[in-house]
Image (cartoon, rainbow, N blue to C red):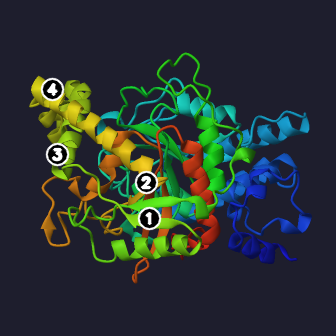
Amino acid sequence: MKRREFLNASLQGSLAVSASMFLPARLLASELPADITELSASKLSAAIRARQVSCLEVMQAYLQRIDRYNPVYNAIVNLAEHDALFDQARRADIALDKGEYWGWMHGMPHAVKDLANVEGMITTSGSRVFRNRVATSDSALAANIRGEGAIFIGKTNTPEFGVGSQTYNEVFGATASAWNPMLTAGGSSGGAASGLGTHMLPVADGSDLMGSLRNPGAYNNVIGFRPSVGRLGGGDPTNRSLATAGPMGRNTEDTIRLLLSISGPVNGQPNAISDRLPEAGQFTPLNLQDIKIGWMGDFEGYLAMEEGVLDVCESSLNILETAGAKVEPCMPDFDMAVLWRTWVDLRNLGRSGALSMYNDPAQRKLLKPEYIWEIERSLELTAERIYDAQRARSRWNQEVVRLLGQFDFLVLPTAQVFPFSKEVHWPSEVAGREMDTYHRWMEVVIGGSLAGNPIVNVPAGFDELGRPMGMQVMGRFGEDKKVMEFALAYEQVTDFLQQRPNLVAAD
């Protein structure tokens, strides 16, 4: 089989079958593709370890691709100097010559979301306030990735302080969807998802407060996984924070491997989930005939949805039903308007830490209006409102537990609109309904964020204009493995992850 023929064949086959969860010791010589960047992260790892491709060749291939496409899609920012990266790749090859293997990401290029620190690199957080801030140490997430042998090539773009599900900022500009450079990549992990969809990155990390792993996953036709709060440490499973970091991948297998890399160790973090996830080889696709899914849709018309979103998702649910899963309509016994007020108050409470920037006139004028609005809303919060929001959240979590006693998974569309123009900061209207805040169009994700449960975005298909959409699949708290095993099974019965965009190269 010729190298190019192998590439096409391997991309058409499912990478999620249980046998693929064990990295092969060596690919056949004829199986190496003409373009190294077309290998999945897991297969790339196997090829590097078997010395079938050098780390230098991998770095050269990825930097060539970045040079060709990043000027159009703007996924990767603060890219390091090529020569310095080539030197690091050569050192990775020398280490292998000496029998040193650093981890499954040995010599692989990686870009961390620009909200997390990487020692020696600029962390702007998408803000002009910090456009020249150089990190003096690694964040815990970056340290874990470095410990797997990755080479940091730069950062992935994010909206200012991660605020908003549209990745644009005044430092680097807007990031485009891999499927259409005129449309948004979503956010706030938009650079990560676009980097995956364009194959400028083998695998990517992100974070999620209000859908920031899920929404860009949908808008770039890749996997985005929000772990149980506390899975990565730093959270409190008994009083769950609203945000968590998480992995993204071109397929489920790669996502699982990065999850295992960033979810441990958690020594010295008493609020972390104590149980450890098993090795990647112990993740196997679920038997869909044993699965019962609660389809929440648009909460019986409560949520405004762009025409076609529900149709795309329900078409994918039909595939699951054909494969044996049971899908039933599901509506929470909860006042969804109360849930929204709860979300807004608790989210705004988290902005109180930004008061120092707000109180500094020179810095305040550099902040985007939506961020200022959230800080000002935090100043209006009273102890009574915070108490009421916390009580409502507790009631919601109890309702989620009840529903997940009836269903294995709860499913919703990942967004209420398809990817829109990257020149539009946020949709002011959806399906004829005015959005009263800049983030109301992503209300569909707040139930999962408030619950703190594991949620995976899986690609659901495309509308007639070729715009991608996803579904968010939520499981029981702590059952991250089962959620990812559902994604493995879903990947076996659908072909969305094998579909590729027609990329536009820089002139």
Q: CA distance from mark 2 to mark 4?
A: 33 Å
Residue pictured at 30% horizontal, 48% vertical: 446
Element type at mark 2? helix
Q: CA distance from mark 1 to mark 3?
A: 26 Å
Residue pictured at 79% horizontal, 50% vertical: 22
Q: Is residue 376 left or right of residue 218?
A: left
Q: Residues within 10 Å of mark 4 (few under 14, many from 20)?
A: few
Q: Is residue 181 above or below residue 58?
A: below
Element type at mark 1? strand
Q: Which of marks 1 and 4 precedes in the sequence?
A: 4
Q: Which of marks 4 and 2 precedes in the sequence?
A: 2
Q: Which of marks 3 and 1 precedes in the sequence?
A: 3
The tag on residue 470 is 1
Q: Which of marks 1 and 2 precedes in the sequence?
A: 2
Q: Quadrant of residue 413?
A: bottom left
Give how far across and how far down residue 469 sits, in percent.
Answer: 42, 68
**Residue type marked 1:** Gly
**Residue type marked 3:** Val
Element type at mark 3? helix
Q: Is residue 392 above or below residue 408?
A: above
Q: Quadrant of residue 96?
A: top right
Residue that label 2 marks: 214
Residue pictured at 41% horizontal, 73% vertical: 314
- 138 or 374, nearer to the observer: 374
Q: Are marks 2 and 4 in contact (CB under 8 Å)?
A: no
Q: Residues within 10 Å of mark 2 (few under 14, many from 20)?
A: many
Give how far across and how far down residue 260 sits, in percent.
Answer: 63, 39
Name the front one of labels 1 and 3.
Answer: 3
Residue 431 seen anywhere in this rendered image of the structure: yes
Which quarter of the image is occupied by the N terminus?
Answer: bottom right
The tag on residue 359 is 4
**Residue type marked 2:** Arg
